[in-house]
Amino acid sequence: MISQEVVEATPREGKFNKNAARRVRVKGRIPAVVYGAAEPSVAVEVDPKQISRILHSDAGHNSIFDLEISGTNGNGVAKAKAMIVDWQYEPIKGALLHIDLKRIALDKAIRVEVPIQLIGVASGVKNEGGILDQVMREIEIECLPGDIPSHLDADVTNMAFGDVLRVADLPHSDKLKFLVDDDATVAHVTAVKEEAAPAPEAEAAAAATPAEPEVAKKGKQETAEAAPAAKK
């Protein structure tokens, strides 16, 4: 999905280590690397708020946007279409730490994963007491960058108990190629899972085993009290 977002990046200079990356973050920016399209990799810094806005958009990391890198090799601004292919969050505060950007050629097919959204309430759930189990939540596809969907919608309203939604049933056009087996299960309506009852042998063994929490507690207390008496 092509976005109207324009991401401005500034080349990083000097050593690329943890201390240098920390200094970039102190400035309110995050370190990034741009690669792809048979061009050299470039270490840059970008605005984390802008990247977060893209990641939380409908298309998410599959968004294709304009990337402008200022001052590359003294040649002014280098422009390219790009997308986010990897990102790292700080585990406690959830702040972005680093991202990888890939240059994209609009006339060449690429492989991406897109979410699968199930629409409606299955009749097997509504009328037969089953549950809808979604086995596959994302699917890998191949298409031109401009044809990447933000998600694939699958209507499950008519699914009865025991019905299976397969990859072949997902809506798609000739512009998309699924890279998953057509018979792979996306979702199915199944029975509610019940907790298995313990076997009679296990119940008998549990009944025969005496519980001794109080005895153990008392013994520990007596040992602790006996220690000072031994010193007299």
Image: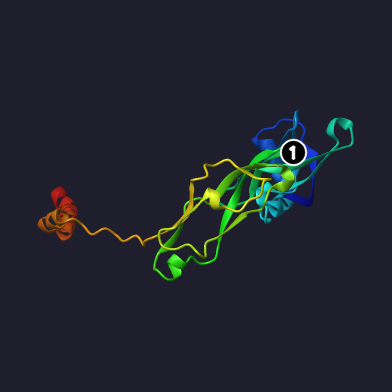
The image quadrant of residue 192 is: bottom left
Which residue is drawn at the image coordinates 72% and 30% (left, top)?
15
Q: Residue at x 66, y 49 (%)?
A: 173
- Horizontal and vertical percent for residue 218? 16, 58
212, 131: nearer the viewer: 131
In x, y percent, where is residue 87? 63, 43
Q: Secondary structure at mark 1?
A: loop
Mark 1: few/some/many CA within 10 Å (<14, 14-19, 20+) = many
Q: Give, as a three-letter code, the residue at label 1.
A: Ile
The residue shown at (71%, 42%) is 144
Q: Which residue is mark 1?
A: 104
Q: Is residue 155 toward the left or the right of residue 223 in the image?
A: right
**How many numbered dots are placed on residues in this image?**
1
Please indicate, yes or no, whether residue 189 appears anywhere in the rendered image. yes
Closer to us: 110 or 217: 110
- Expressed as whole percent of the image width and height from the top left, the position of residue 130 reads 40, 64
Instruction: Name the colouring of the figure.
Output: rainbow
The image quarter in which residue 225 lies: bottom left
Name the foreground residue: 154 vs 114: 154
